Image (tube, rainbow, N blue to C red):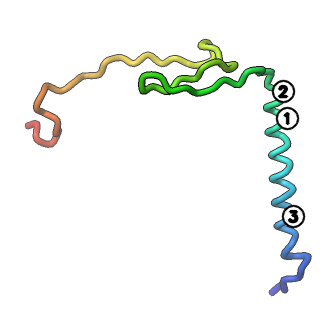
């Protein structure tokens, strides 16, 4: 069985901190290189939260059309009772 020494117990802590710092640096670099001058803001209007401004264009979002599904007649909300 290996004994815990100050070097053994500090190594995972140091590697975790170095990894966290490196990932944070990469995230900051990615945001700075995104080319977006105005990040936009969220505003609530008429009970709906909207993104105003920003670098997102409508063409950037995929659109999946929602086709109407078969609806059940009124009064049959529980499928186990339909027989």
Measured in 3D between alpha carbons, the distance from the residue under mark 1 to the one under mark 3, in whole angstroms, is: 22 Å
Q: Is residue 82 above or below residue 41?
A: below
Q: Neighbour class for label 3 at 10 Å: few (<14), some, many (≥20)?
A: few
Closer-to-camera residue (44/29)? 44
Helix, strand or loop for disc 1: helix
- How many labels were placed on the picture? 3
Residue bearing the label numbered 1: 29
Quadrant assignment, res 19 = bottom right
Above or below, 63 relative to 42 = above
Tell whether 10 sits left or right of 46.
right
Which quadrant, please, contains the N terminus? Answer: bottom right
Disc 1 packing (10 Å; few <14; some 14–19; many ≥20): few
Query: In the image, residue 80 lies at what x, y percent?
Result: 15, 42
Position in image of residue 62 (x %, y %): 56, 19
Q: Label 3, on which residue?
A: 14
The residue positioned 58% from the left and 27% from the top of the image is 42
- Mark number for residue 33? 2
Mark 2 burial class by Cα count in 10 Å: few <14, some 14-19, many 20+: few
SS for callout 3: helix
| Residue 63: x %, y % from top left | 51, 17
Q: Which residue in the rendered view is the most extreme toward the top?
A: 59
Q: Residue visible at 24% across and 22% down? A: 70
Residue 37 sits in quarter:
top right
User: What quarter of the picture does the C terminus occupy?
Assistant: top left
Q: Earlier in the sequence, mark 1 or mark 3?
A: 3
Is there CB contact under 8 Å for labels 2 and 1? yes
Q: Earlier in the sequence, mark 3 or mark 2?
A: 3
Residue at 87% in and 56% down: 18
């Amino acid at each position: 069985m290996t004994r815990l020494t100050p070097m053994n117990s500090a190594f995972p802590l140091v590697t975790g901190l170095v990894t966290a710092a490196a990932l944070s640096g990469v995230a900051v670099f990615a945001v700075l290189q995104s080319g977006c001058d105005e990040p936009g803001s969220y505003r609530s209007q008429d009970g709906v939260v909207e993104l105003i401004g920003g670098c997102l264009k409508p063409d950037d979002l995929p659109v999946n059309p929602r086709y109407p599904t078969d609806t059940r007649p009124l009064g049959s909300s529980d499928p186990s009772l339909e027989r």
